[in-house]
Image (tube, coloured by chain):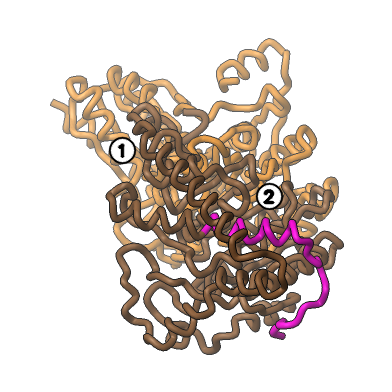
Amino acid sequence: MLNDRSTGVGVDTRTEMVELFTTMVRIRKFEERVRSAYLEGLVHGTTHLCIGQEAVCAGVVAVLRATDYLIYTYRGHGVCIARGMSMAAAFAEIFGRRTGVSGGLGGSMHLTDPELNLVCAAGIVGGGLPVAVGTGLAAQLSGRGQVAVTFFGDGAANIGAFHESLNIAAVWQLPMLFVCENNYYGEFTRIDRTTPFEDLVRRGAAFDMHSVAVDGNDVMLVKEAAADALMRARAGAGPTFLECRTYRHSGHSRTDPAKYRPAAEVEAWLARDPLLMFEQILLERGIHEPQELEQIKAKVLEEVVAASREAEAAEWPIAADYLGCAMVRT
Amino acid sequence: MSNLEAMVLAREGLVTPETATYREAISRAIGDEMRADSRVLILGEDIGESEGPLKTTLGLHKEFGPTRVRDTPIAEEAFVGAALGLAVAGYRPVVEIMFADFIGVCFDQIVNSIAKHHFMSGGRMHAPLVIRAIGGGGLRFGPQHSQTGESWLLNVPGLRIVAASTPDEAYGMIRAAIRDPDPVIVLEHKALLGTKGSVIFGEAGIRDLDTPRLVAAGENVTIVASLAMVPRALEAARQLAESGISAEVIDLRVLRPLNAQVIVDSVKKTSRLLTVEEQGVHGGWGSSVVAEIVQQAFDYLDAPPIRIGLPDTPLPYSPPLEDHAIPSVERIAQAARDLIGRSI
């Protein structure tokens, strides 16, 4: 079931490839700034970086329409940046400032923006899946070709909500895309110690769902598989389970040095850095000159620095910003 | 509209109450809202063609069809969580939890997803959805199918929790809950499903979800009850009246957010407080009510308040044991007499 060959779906133009590369660089630089900001004391509590997994969110989000719904996880910064969330507002949220996307009430694990249909960032492993099913049902009822896309990790594949949600999506043939970011570690524990097999695509197939696995570090393959799934969903052919095999370069969260991972495994995956892999494709195919790519990176870095500065200078929320705000009608 | 206003309208002949059962009232409330608002839909187990295991969706599938009256798999976590997805996508979902005990199955979605969504979005998203949970004992369903679940969610900001004690309340509160912009948990009681009462249907029957309700006026003792304990408290009050004790009965009805003003006013008059709940008293709403009274009306109390509820055990199956465990009319009346006897 591993899809490692191009089917020609969504053949990319040069512009699309530049956009895709830029998106991945924006996510990488954003996350690198979150990491350094954490060390500077600007990020509070904890944060979960998606460095190493950029190809998954960039590839999937690239093929979505503005009307599609996104439900993701606490490791969701990449999804939000790929979707076009304001970097300054995202940084401000992570820094706990009043100008954050949620006014500092949610934080790093809960970046959302209803205007971009970034509707739910679950902090509980697997917690977003049932919510995604609801948006999937809404998408089906609307009859407007909408799709609900949900991201989750390999850890979520063992929680009850996962099974209940996949089952409902399959039995109701909801227009959904389940993106399993299999990075082989549920928090600190490797998948072989928690799950009887590593190819989680089988979990989708178990629900009689169209299920595909791709190299999640190859953005072209991810994008292509997502495009195919979206086409199926919009055509009323039901949900797709897309396993993207990938790796997080750092630990589960900022307090985790990830010493539990074998050095050889880490090394092998670092050599397959999704950004480097895509860069090579762009250079080999002569789509870009090296200096062009460097220019993109430099420009993105400027954007990230400026956005972070804006967020760092933003004011703190005050008590009146949260008191009495648990409900619409108090 | 308040119950009192509706009663005035009824007396003036402006609205005509009908006699209906609690379960008919539930079904009609959902149906009337579905007719009024195309965004309303209901999901649950066996609620479609079967019209609910406890027959609380009578006629809905027939009128609205399987798209809006949707049978789900036995998967509370998924379909309750799905209500949030539907709500953020612009729908007004109602989900039925067949037995309130199953709140345990979907606790994470209620507590971590639904209750916090509006807040975590910085107020940018709303979660207008209704979770109806049919609970309660007295029908010999045993420890896992008899709980009211009243206090399980009491400490969760972001939720409104209401409890219906009559057909009229069931109708009016469910309609109001569906219109509410926040997630509302509507607790129903299965021992009440077949009870009949006078119901004002239509817009005039829509009730507030804000405050407890005085259901019998009295002078000597205030009895606060919820769900199936309300009719028992009323019967106790009738018996007490025969021995010259005048009891005021308040239906708590809105468990969260707790607005204790009606109770405070009552206790200032009666100087005695008795709470009656169909659950353990430790961590129950009775404790919160007593705390409010101690804080707001301490000087008016003539005796320490009494809380009665279930013993500190699961509800047993065997009829004599279940009957022993659930506060009876006699126990309520005796507790009221004890309060008066203890008065300083």
Amino acid found under the numbered disc labelled 1: Ser
Specify the quadrant of the image occupied by residue A259.
bottom left
In the displayed image of the protein, which residue is found farthest to the top?
B12
Give the number of marks.
2
Q: Kindly identify the residue that appears in the image at 71 percent across and 29 percent down.
A: B201
Question: Can you give x and y, in whole percent of width and height, for residue A81 in the image?
Answer: 56, 51
Question: Can you give x and y, in whole percent of width and height, for residue A205 in the image?
Answer: 70, 81
- In front of the other: B324 or A92: A92
Quick one: label 1 or label 2, which is nearer the N terminus? Answer: 2
- Which chain comes out orange in the rendered image? B
Q: Residue B288 carries which label?
A: 1
Q: Mark 2 lies on which chain?
A: B
Q: Tell whether position A21 is magenta.
A: yes
Q: What element carries label 2?
A: loop
Q: Kindly identify the residue that appears in the image at 78 percent across and 64 percent down.
A: A12
Q: Residues within 10 Å of mark 1 (few under 14, many from 20)?
A: some
Region in magenta = A1-27
* Residues behind callouts 1 and 2 on a single chain: yes
- In front of the other: B207 or A2: A2
- Which chain comes out brown in the rendered image? A
Question: Can you give x and y, in whole percent of width and height, for residue A1 in the image?
Answer: 72, 85
Residue at label 2? Answer: B56
